[in-house]
Amino acid sequence: MTMRSPSRKRPSQRGDTAFTLIELLVVIAIIAILASLLLPALGRAKNQAKDVDCINNLRQLGLGIRLWASDQGDHYPWNVTVANGGAQDSPNWVDNIRCVSNQVQNTKIPVCPRDFNRTAAIDWSVMKGNSNVSYLFGKSFTQARTQDIILGDFNVIGGGGGHDVTWNVFLGTSIDAAWDTNLHVLQGNFAMGDGSVRLVHTPELREMISTLLTTGQMTNVTLSKPRAAL
């Protein structure tokens, strides 16, 4: 009588391929670490792209205003009467920007890509200052000069507050101009009379205004912010 050898069970293959709980937690932790490293970088890259778009917008809008001014004896829209095609004394603030619609046809140009509270108008004829424009203009700059502040991000504070922030020669060195935390966060862009667009921090902003006043180039500097029609 032959003896049957005891049968051997084949080892289960599941233990060789399945994740254990510890291995799964390690994978999740690695993914979380990678995400924490990559997401801020992606966010910075996206904001940098928006900053570049803002500079391009200001460059195009500034060029449009300078071209318009060249046909008006080098006077900006805010210093040319409504009867002559300008926006001086117009009850609608946006006319100061809208008058260059022939030079700048894209209604997206007056909106900063970082401005989440404003959107592009569907047409220049229905554009509103408080909802379709992100940029202020240099109200006290009259005839075109290279160092004029033509346009800039709207979030400048100081100068008495309100829609028109103003500094004059009587303030001396007490210039309180600053950028708030909107748009480019404590900094902003200016389109200048020479065609350049400058990224300006608060100390530089104050120095620019102080230089304009102390060198006698003007007795006051007024930056006019977007607003609704009266």
Image: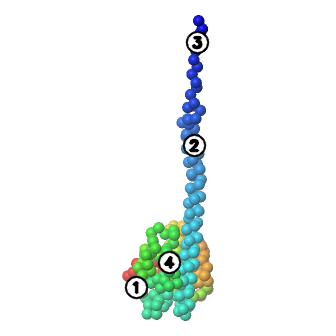
- As drawn, which residue projects farthest toward the left? 230
Residue 143: image tag: none
First reached walking from the N terminus: tag 4 or tag 3: 3
Q: Tell whether label 1 touches label 3 (CB within 8 Å).
A: no
Please provide percent x and percent y for residue 49.
57, 67
- Describe the element under mark 2 as helix, strand or loop: helix
The residue shown at (54%, 92%) is 71
Q: How many labels does the image show?
A: 4
Callout 1: SS = loop
Q: In this view, does 9 lie to the left or right of 121?
A: right
Camera-side mark, 4 or 2: 4
Mark 1–mark 4 distance (CA, rounded to whole Å): 24 Å
Read off the residue under disc 2. 27
Crowding at mark 2 (Cα within 10 Å: few <14, some 14-19, many 20+): few
Task: For marks 2 and 1, give the one nearer the viewer.
Answer: 2
- Observer able to see residue 210: no
Spatial CA distance of label 2 from label 1 is 63 Å
The amino acid type found where label 1 is placed reads Pro
Q: In this view, does 38 lie above or below 53?
A: above
Q: Residue 4 carries which label?
A: 3
Checking the image for residue 106, the label placed there is 4
Callout 2 amino acid: Val
The amino acid sitting under disc 3 is Arg
Label 3 or label 2, whichever lies nearer to me, is: 3
Residue 49 vs 121, above or below: the answer is above
Q: Which residue is drawn at 59% across and 6% down?
A: 1
3D distance between C-alphas at marks 3 and 1:
107 Å
